[in-house]
Amino acid sequence: MKKFLIIGITIIMFFFKNQATADYEKVFFDFKIDSISGEEIDFQKYRNKVILLVNTASYCGFTPQYDNLQKLWDKYKNDGLVVLGIPSNSFNQEKKANEEVKKFCEVNFNINFPMSEITEVKGDNAHAIFKWAEQNHGKSAIPKWNFYKILINKEGKIEETYSSFTNPTSNKIVSKIKELLKI
């Protein structure tokens, strides 16, 4: 009787699982986005690298995380990490123009990791990369606030997501990055 109960509970758990199917018809490297300076960023150039995708904003309580994103980039870029900032006004905390965001990041945080143009990250107008993330990783890949982090492995698939509260240089993130980079 216990055996049937366990089997039944297991089957029910699969029906209520809140994770997308992760078919990955496309991977991260199949997408493109415009940079903050207006050039196209073809994610193909990041093939075989680990990507930390972060939606950012200039007027957010988490904005000081830019410092630690830059530290991560400086420390691990030669090992194959790409920090990719996606400025977004999805939470009404970003400047209105790409030039303003670029200047703000350079002057206040000395940012030199790649950044996209101001981009929607949730809802119907979200950039295709965020729709792809939700489709393949479920609701946990939808940014809940600014400085939400999506870690993408060398195969171009989502490895893990991290809340805005998780500092980019936390042991949780750094240890996972090092594991993926095999360092």
Image (spheres, rainbow, N blue to C red):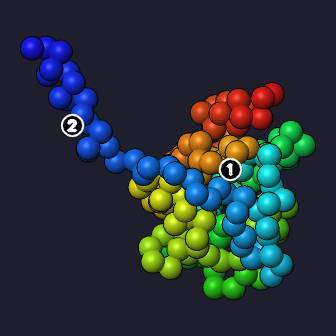
Task: Determine the residue located farthest toward the left in the rendered image.
Answer: 1
- Identity, as a three-letter code, of the amino acid under mark 2: Ile
Task: Determine the residue located farthest toward the right in the rendered image.
Answer: 78
Badge 1 crowding class, 10 Å Cα cut-off, few under 14, some 14 to 19, many 20 or more, is many
The picture places residue 77, in percent across and down from the top left corner, at 85, 46
The picture places residue 71, in percent across and down from the top left corner, at 79, 46
Task: Judge by depth and name the residue closer to the eye, 22 or 115.
Answer: 22
Left or right side of 166 for 144: left
The picture places residue 70, in percent across and down from the top left corner, at 78, 52
Quadrant holding the C terminus: top right
- Identity, as a three-letter code, of the amino acid under mark 1: Gly
Left or right side of 106 for 66: left
The picture places residue 125, in percent across and down from the top left corner, at 50, 79
Quadrant holding the N terminus: top left
Residue plotted at (15% across, 20% down): 4
Secondary-structure class at tag 2: helix
- Res 180 → quadrant: top right
Residue plotted at (76% across, 62% down): 43
Residue at which label 2 appears:
12
Q: Earlier in the sequence, mark 2 or mark 1?
A: 2
- Disc sitting over residue 156 in the figure: 1
Q: How many marks?
A: 2
Task: Judge by depth and name the residue closer to the eye, 55 or 10.
Answer: 10
Secondary-structure class at tag 1: loop
Task: Determine the residue located farthest toward the top in the rendered image.
Answer: 2
